[in-house]
Amino acid sequence: MVRTASASAAAGPTLAVVAREAGVSVPTASKVVNGREDVAPETRRRVTEALDRLGYVRRPRFDAAKAPRLVDLVVHSLESSWSGAVLHGVEDAAHDAGLEVVVSAALIRSRVGRPERGWLDKLVARGSSGVLFNLAELSDSQYAWLEQHRIPFVMIDPVQEPPEGVVSVGAANWQGGLTATEHLLSLGHERIAVIAGPRRTMCSSARVAGYRSALASAGVRHRPEYVRHAGFDESVAHRRMLELLDLPEPPTAVFVCSDRMALGVYEALAERGLEVPDDISVVGFDDLPEARWASPALTTVRQPLSEMAATALRSLLRMMDGHRPESTRTELSTRLVERASTAAPRA
Protein backbone atom coordinates (compact mmCIF):
# COMPACT_ATOMS: atom_id res chain seq x y z
CA MET A 1 0.00 0.00 0.00
CA VAL A 2 2.85 2.39 0.72
CA ARG A 3 4.28 1.81 -2.74
CA THR A 4 0.92 2.53 -4.35
CA ALA A 5 0.54 5.80 -2.50
CA SER A 6 4.07 6.89 -3.34
CA ALA A 7 3.54 6.06 -7.01
CA SER A 8 0.33 8.07 -7.09
CA ALA A 9 1.97 11.05 -5.47
CA ALA A 10 4.87 10.93 -7.89
CA ALA A 11 2.52 10.82 -10.85
CA GLY A 12 0.59 13.89 -9.62
CA PRO A 13 -3.15 14.33 -9.16
CA THR A 14 -5.57 12.74 -11.57
CA LEU A 15 -8.13 14.71 -13.54
CA ALA A 16 -10.83 13.35 -11.22
CA VAL A 17 -9.06 14.91 -8.22
CA VAL A 18 -8.83 18.26 -10.03
CA ALA A 19 -12.54 18.11 -10.94
CA ARG A 20 -13.52 17.39 -7.34
CA GLU A 21 -11.33 20.25 -6.09
CA ALA A 22 -12.95 22.68 -8.57
CA GLY A 23 -16.46 21.39 -7.97
CA VAL A 24 -17.05 20.35 -11.60
CA SER A 25 -17.46 17.12 -13.54
CA VAL A 26 -14.51 15.24 -15.00
CA PRO A 27 -15.64 15.96 -18.61
CA THR A 28 -15.75 19.68 -17.82
CA ALA A 29 -12.26 19.59 -16.33
CA SER A 30 -11.11 17.71 -19.41
CA LYS A 31 -12.51 20.42 -21.67
CA VAL A 32 -10.47 23.06 -19.82
CA VAL A 33 -7.29 20.96 -19.97
CA ASN A 34 -7.75 20.43 -23.71
CA GLY A 35 -8.48 24.09 -24.46
CA ARG A 36 -12.13 23.67 -25.43
CA GLU A 37 -14.12 26.92 -25.71
CA ASP A 38 -17.54 25.60 -24.58
CA VAL A 39 -16.83 26.28 -20.87
CA ALA A 40 -18.18 29.24 -18.84
CA PRO A 41 -15.46 31.79 -17.84
CA GLU A 42 -16.08 31.33 -14.10
CA THR A 43 -15.90 27.53 -14.41
CA ARG A 44 -12.72 27.82 -16.45
CA ARG A 45 -11.19 30.02 -13.74
CA ARG A 46 -11.98 27.53 -10.95
CA VAL A 47 -10.58 24.59 -12.90
CA THR A 48 -7.43 26.50 -13.88
CA GLU A 49 -6.79 27.52 -10.27
CA ALA A 50 -7.28 23.92 -9.13
CA LEU A 51 -4.86 22.71 -11.79
CA ASP A 52 -2.21 25.15 -10.61
CA ARG A 53 -2.85 24.57 -6.91
CA LEU A 54 -2.62 20.77 -7.18
CA GLY A 55 0.30 20.79 -9.63
CA TYR A 56 -1.53 18.90 -12.37
CA VAL A 57 0.84 18.08 -15.24
CA ARG A 58 -0.73 18.57 -18.66
CA ARG A 59 0.31 15.86 -21.09
CA PRO A 60 1.35 17.07 -24.54
CA ARG A 61 -1.46 16.76 -27.04
CA PHE A 62 -1.09 14.17 -29.79
CA ASP A 63 -0.52 15.83 -33.14
CA ALA A 64 -1.32 13.35 -35.92
CA ALA A 65 0.26 15.61 -38.53
CA LYS A 66 3.60 15.46 -36.71
CA ALA A 67 3.44 11.77 -35.85
CA PRO A 68 5.49 9.38 -37.97
CA ARG A 69 3.51 7.52 -40.59
CA LEU A 70 2.84 3.89 -39.93
CA VAL A 71 3.21 1.00 -42.39
CA ASP A 72 2.57 -2.71 -41.94
CA LEU A 73 4.91 -5.51 -42.98
CA VAL A 74 3.22 -8.90 -43.25
CA VAL A 75 5.73 -11.77 -43.29
CA HIS A 76 5.12 -15.48 -43.62
CA SER A 77 7.31 -16.27 -40.62
CA LEU A 78 9.94 -14.71 -38.38
CA GLU A 79 11.80 -17.98 -37.88
CA SER A 80 13.93 -17.97 -41.04
CA SER A 81 17.00 -15.98 -42.01
CA TRP A 82 15.10 -15.25 -45.26
CA SER A 83 12.60 -13.16 -43.30
CA GLY A 84 15.43 -11.62 -41.30
CA ALA A 85 17.01 -10.26 -44.47
CA VAL A 86 13.67 -8.79 -45.56
CA LEU A 87 13.14 -7.17 -42.16
CA HIS A 88 16.62 -5.67 -42.29
CA GLY A 89 15.93 -4.06 -45.66
CA VAL A 90 12.57 -2.66 -44.57
CA GLU A 91 13.98 -1.37 -41.29
CA ASP A 92 16.81 0.56 -42.96
CA ALA A 93 14.56 2.09 -45.62
CA ALA A 94 11.88 2.96 -43.05
CA HIS A 95 14.43 4.69 -40.83
CA ASP A 96 15.63 6.82 -43.74
CA ALA A 97 12.03 7.77 -44.59
CA GLY A 98 10.94 8.50 -41.01
CA LEU A 99 8.37 5.70 -41.00
CA GLU A 100 7.27 3.39 -38.22
CA VAL A 101 6.79 -0.29 -39.10
CA VAL A 102 4.41 -2.83 -37.55
CA VAL A 103 5.45 -6.43 -38.27
CA SER A 104 2.73 -9.08 -38.43
CA ALA A 105 3.78 -12.72 -38.49
CA ALA A 106 2.14 -16.11 -38.00
CA LEU A 107 -1.19 -14.75 -39.16
CA ILE A 108 -1.30 -16.96 -42.25
CA ARG A 109 -3.23 -19.85 -40.79
CA SER A 110 -5.49 -21.03 -43.58
CA ARG A 111 -4.41 -23.85 -45.87
CA VAL A 112 -4.05 -21.52 -48.84
CA GLY A 113 -1.70 -19.25 -46.93
CA ARG A 114 -3.88 -16.17 -46.88
CA PRO A 115 -3.83 -13.51 -44.15
CA GLU A 116 -6.89 -13.65 -41.94
CA ARG A 117 -9.61 -11.11 -42.63
CA GLY A 118 -9.61 -9.91 -39.02
CA TRP A 119 -6.10 -8.59 -39.51
CA LEU A 120 -7.26 -6.39 -42.37
CA ASP A 121 -9.86 -4.80 -40.10
CA LYS A 122 -7.16 -4.06 -37.51
CA LEU A 123 -5.12 -2.40 -40.26
CA VAL A 124 -7.67 0.40 -40.55
CA ALA A 125 -8.14 0.65 -36.80
CA ARG A 126 -4.46 1.39 -36.15
CA GLY A 127 -4.26 3.91 -38.99
CA SER A 128 -1.61 2.29 -41.17
CA SER A 129 -0.76 4.27 -44.29
CA GLY A 130 0.29 1.25 -46.37
CA VAL A 131 1.22 -2.43 -46.37
CA LEU A 132 4.09 -4.60 -47.56
CA PHE A 133 3.15 -8.24 -48.11
CA ASN A 134 6.06 -10.70 -48.10
CA LEU A 135 5.45 -14.19 -49.50
CA ALA A 136 1.74 -13.75 -48.90
CA GLU A 137 -1.12 -14.92 -51.07
CA LEU A 138 -4.27 -12.82 -51.02
CA SER A 139 -7.75 -13.77 -52.15
CA ASP A 140 -9.70 -11.73 -54.69
CA SER A 141 -11.91 -10.39 -51.91
CA GLN A 142 -8.87 -9.28 -49.88
CA TYR A 143 -7.42 -7.47 -52.88
CA ALA A 144 -10.81 -5.81 -53.36
CA TRP A 145 -10.96 -4.87 -49.67
CA LEU A 146 -7.59 -3.12 -49.85
CA GLU A 147 -8.64 -1.24 -52.98
CA GLN A 148 -11.98 -0.31 -51.45
CA HIS A 149 -10.29 1.21 -48.41
CA ARG A 150 -7.68 2.87 -50.65
CA ILE A 151 -4.79 1.38 -48.72
CA PRO A 152 -1.65 1.27 -50.91
CA PHE A 153 0.27 -2.00 -50.81
CA VAL A 154 3.24 -3.68 -52.47
CA MET A 155 3.97 -7.40 -52.77
CA ILE A 156 7.51 -8.63 -52.03
CA ASP A 157 8.22 -11.85 -53.94
CA PRO A 158 4.52 -12.76 -54.36
CA VAL A 159 3.62 -16.43 -54.32
CA GLN A 160 1.46 -16.21 -57.44
CA GLU A 161 1.09 -13.71 -60.26
CA PRO A 162 -0.76 -10.79 -58.65
CA PRO A 163 -3.76 -9.19 -60.38
CA GLU A 164 -3.15 -6.60 -63.04
CA GLY A 165 -2.10 -3.26 -61.58
CA VAL A 166 -0.76 -4.67 -58.30
CA VAL A 167 2.78 -3.46 -57.60
CA SER A 168 5.36 -6.14 -56.77
CA VAL A 169 9.12 -6.47 -56.30
CA GLY A 170 11.08 -9.67 -56.83
CA ALA A 171 14.31 -11.16 -58.12
CA ALA A 172 15.28 -12.20 -61.64
CA ASN A 173 14.42 -15.83 -60.95
CA TRP A 174 14.56 -17.02 -64.57
CA GLN A 175 18.04 -15.54 -64.95
CA GLY A 176 19.07 -17.13 -61.66
CA GLY A 177 17.96 -20.58 -62.80
CA LEU A 178 19.76 -20.08 -66.10
CA THR A 179 22.98 -18.96 -64.39
CA ALA A 180 23.00 -21.88 -61.93
CA THR A 181 22.54 -24.42 -64.70
CA GLU A 182 25.07 -22.78 -67.01
CA HIS A 183 27.63 -22.97 -64.19
CA LEU A 184 27.11 -26.72 -63.87
CA LEU A 185 27.23 -27.15 -67.64
CA SER A 186 30.51 -25.24 -67.79
CA LEU A 187 32.02 -27.74 -65.36
CA GLY A 188 31.13 -30.57 -67.72
CA HIS A 189 27.89 -31.84 -66.17
CA GLU A 190 25.09 -33.02 -68.45
CA ARG A 191 23.02 -35.12 -66.05
CA ILE A 192 21.71 -32.11 -64.11
CA ALA A 193 18.59 -32.37 -61.96
CA VAL A 194 16.53 -29.62 -60.37
CA ILE A 195 14.65 -29.74 -57.07
CA ALA A 196 12.18 -26.86 -57.21
CA GLY A 197 9.60 -25.40 -54.87
CA PRO A 198 5.84 -25.89 -55.31
CA ARG A 199 4.72 -25.95 -58.94
CA ARG A 200 2.31 -23.04 -58.60
CA THR A 201 4.76 -20.52 -57.15
CA MET A 202 6.05 -17.77 -59.44
CA CYS A 203 9.67 -18.00 -58.36
CA SER A 204 9.82 -21.78 -58.66
CA SER A 205 8.30 -21.83 -62.16
CA ALA A 206 10.71 -19.12 -63.33
CA ARG A 207 13.79 -20.90 -61.94
CA VAL A 208 12.82 -24.19 -63.59
CA ALA A 209 12.20 -22.33 -66.86
CA GLY A 210 15.71 -20.84 -66.64
CA TYR A 211 17.14 -24.32 -65.97
CA ARG A 212 15.41 -25.75 -69.03
CA SER A 213 16.51 -22.84 -71.20
CA ALA A 214 20.16 -23.38 -70.24
CA LEU A 215 19.95 -27.08 -71.10
CA ALA A 216 18.32 -26.32 -74.45
CA SER A 217 20.93 -23.71 -75.35
CA ALA A 218 23.69 -26.21 -74.58
CA GLY A 219 22.03 -28.94 -76.62
CA VAL A 220 21.60 -31.15 -73.54
CA ARG A 221 18.53 -33.40 -73.50
CA HIS A 222 15.89 -32.46 -70.97
CA ARG A 223 14.95 -35.38 -68.75
CA PRO A 224 11.51 -35.02 -67.13
CA GLU A 225 12.50 -37.46 -64.36
CA TYR A 226 15.22 -35.02 -63.32
CA VAL A 227 12.66 -32.33 -62.39
CA ARG A 228 11.31 -32.73 -58.85
CA HIS A 229 9.10 -30.40 -56.81
CA ALA A 230 9.04 -29.94 -53.04
CA GLY A 231 8.12 -27.38 -50.42
CA PHE A 232 10.77 -24.82 -49.56
CA ASP A 233 12.05 -26.89 -46.64
CA GLU A 234 14.70 -29.48 -45.90
CA SER A 235 12.55 -32.56 -45.28
CA VAL A 236 10.79 -32.82 -48.63
CA ALA A 237 13.95 -31.87 -50.53
CA HIS A 238 15.68 -34.69 -48.64
CA ARG A 239 13.11 -37.18 -49.99
CA ARG A 240 13.31 -35.81 -53.53
CA MET A 241 17.09 -36.20 -53.55
CA LEU A 242 16.78 -39.83 -52.47
CA GLU A 243 14.31 -40.38 -55.33
CA LEU A 244 16.83 -38.94 -57.80
CA LEU A 245 19.59 -41.16 -56.46
CA ASP A 246 17.37 -44.22 -56.97
CA LEU A 247 16.98 -43.55 -60.70
CA PRO A 248 18.69 -46.01 -63.08
CA GLU A 249 20.93 -43.13 -64.17
CA PRO A 250 21.15 -40.65 -61.27
CA PRO A 251 22.30 -37.07 -61.83
CA THR A 252 25.86 -35.91 -61.32
CA ALA A 253 24.71 -32.43 -60.30
CA VAL A 254 21.58 -30.87 -58.82
CA PHE A 255 20.27 -27.32 -58.82
CA VAL A 256 18.21 -26.81 -55.64
CA CYS A 257 15.85 -23.84 -55.66
CA SER A 258 16.54 -22.67 -52.10
CA ASP A 259 19.43 -22.87 -49.67
CA ARG A 260 17.25 -24.46 -46.98
CA MET A 261 16.29 -27.22 -49.41
CA ALA A 262 19.96 -27.69 -50.26
CA LEU A 263 20.64 -28.57 -46.62
CA GLY A 264 18.15 -31.40 -46.94
CA VAL A 265 19.94 -32.52 -50.11
CA TYR A 266 23.24 -32.56 -48.21
CA GLU A 267 21.68 -34.86 -45.59
CA ALA A 268 20.35 -37.26 -48.22
CA LEU A 269 23.74 -37.49 -49.91
CA ALA A 270 25.47 -38.12 -46.60
CA GLU A 271 23.03 -40.94 -45.86
CA ARG A 272 24.03 -42.63 -49.09
CA GLY A 273 27.73 -42.17 -48.38
CA LEU A 274 28.18 -39.62 -51.16
CA GLU A 275 30.39 -36.55 -50.91
CA VAL A 276 29.85 -33.02 -52.20
CA PRO A 277 31.24 -32.16 -54.73
CA ASP A 278 33.31 -35.29 -55.44
CA ASP A 279 30.30 -37.49 -56.13
CA ILE A 280 27.68 -34.87 -56.91
CA SER A 281 27.70 -31.07 -57.29
CA VAL A 282 25.06 -28.91 -55.60
CA VAL A 283 23.95 -25.35 -56.34
CA GLY A 284 21.44 -23.53 -54.12
CA PHE A 285 19.44 -20.33 -54.39
CA ASP A 286 19.13 -17.30 -52.03
CA ASP A 287 22.62 -16.94 -50.48
CA LEU A 288 21.39 -17.07 -46.92
CA PRO A 289 23.91 -17.33 -44.04
CA GLU A 290 23.28 -21.10 -44.06
CA ALA A 291 24.98 -21.30 -47.45
CA ARG A 292 28.28 -20.13 -45.94
CA TRP A 293 27.92 -22.30 -42.85
CA ALA A 294 27.27 -25.53 -44.78
CA SER A 295 30.10 -28.02 -45.20
CA PRO A 296 31.26 -27.71 -47.88
CA ALA A 297 30.22 -24.09 -48.34
CA LEU A 298 27.35 -23.94 -50.81
CA THR A 299 27.65 -22.47 -54.28
CA THR A 300 24.41 -20.55 -54.69
CA VAL A 301 22.53 -17.88 -56.59
CA ARG A 302 22.27 -14.70 -54.58
CA GLN A 303 19.01 -12.87 -54.66
CA PRO A 304 19.19 -9.42 -53.01
CA LEU A 305 16.54 -9.90 -50.33
CA SER A 306 17.27 -6.76 -48.31
CA GLU A 307 17.47 -4.65 -51.47
CA MET A 308 14.15 -6.12 -52.67
CA ALA A 309 12.50 -5.16 -49.38
CA ALA A 310 13.96 -1.64 -49.40
CA THR A 311 12.88 -1.13 -53.02
CA ALA A 312 9.36 -2.28 -52.13
CA LEU A 313 9.17 0.18 -49.23
CA ARG A 314 10.34 3.06 -51.40
CA SER A 315 7.70 2.16 -53.99
CA LEU A 316 5.08 2.06 -51.22
CA LEU A 317 6.21 5.46 -49.97
CA ARG A 318 5.70 6.98 -53.41
CA MET A 319 2.25 5.43 -53.58
CA MET A 320 1.42 6.83 -50.14
CA ASP A 321 2.37 10.26 -51.51
CA GLY A 322 -0.07 9.82 -54.38
CA HIS A 323 2.38 8.74 -57.11
CA ARG A 324 1.89 5.61 -59.15
CA PRO A 325 5.04 3.62 -60.02
CA GLU A 326 5.96 3.63 -63.70
CA SER A 327 6.06 -0.18 -63.68
CA THR A 328 4.03 -2.58 -61.57
CA ARG A 329 6.79 -5.22 -61.57
CA THR A 330 10.38 -4.59 -60.49
CA GLU A 331 12.97 -7.36 -60.71
CA LEU A 332 16.41 -7.04 -59.14
CA SER A 333 19.32 -8.95 -60.62
CA THR A 334 20.70 -12.20 -59.22
CA ARG A 335 24.28 -13.46 -59.40
CA LEU A 336 26.14 -16.71 -58.84
CA VAL A 337 28.29 -17.00 -55.72
CA GLU A 338 30.83 -19.79 -56.26
CA ARG A 339 31.97 -21.73 -53.22
CA ALA A 340 33.06 -25.31 -52.62
CA SER A 341 30.00 -27.42 -53.50
CA THR A 342 30.56 -27.67 -57.27
CA ALA A 343 33.27 -29.36 -59.32
CA ALA A 344 33.71 -31.24 -62.56
CA PRO A 345 32.03 -34.65 -62.70
CA ARG A 346 34.12 -37.75 -62.12
CA ALA A 347 35.41 -39.31 -65.33
Image (cartoon, rainbow, N blue to C red):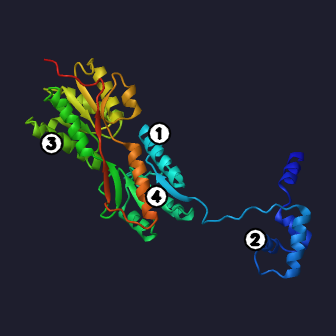
265 on left or right of 213? right
Please identify, in this view, whether the residue under mark 1 or under mark 4 is nearer the observer: 4
Helix, strand or loop at mark 4: strand
The one nearer the camera, 20 or 265, is 20
Please identify, in this view, whether the residue under mark 2 or under mark 4 is nearer the observer: 2
- Mark drawn on residue 24: none
Three-letter code for the amino acid on which mark 1 is drawn: Glu
Give me the C-alpha separation between circle 1 and circle 4: 21 Å
Among numbered discs 3 and 2, the one appearing first in the sequence: 2
The location of residue 112, given as percent across then percent down, is: 37, 53
Please identify, in this view, whether the residue under mark 1 or under mark 3 is nearer the observer: 3
- Mark drawn on residue 34: 2
Report the residue that reaches farthest toward the front: 96
Three-letter code for the amino acid on which mark 4 is drawn: Val
Among numbered discs 1 and 3, the one appearing first in the sequence: 1
37 on left or right of 270? right
Are the residues tagged 3 and 2 within 8 Å (C-beta)?
no
- Mark drawn on residue 79: 1
| Residue underneath mark 4 | 131
Residue at image position (41%, 49%) is 309
Three-letter code for the amino acid on which mark 2 is drawn: Asn
Among numbered discs 1 and 2, the one appearing first in the sequence: 2
Give me the C-alpha separation between circle 1 and circle 2: 45 Å
Examine the image and state in which quarter residue 40 appears. Answer: bottom right
| Residue underneath mark 3 | 213
- Vertical placement of 255 versus 59: above or below? above
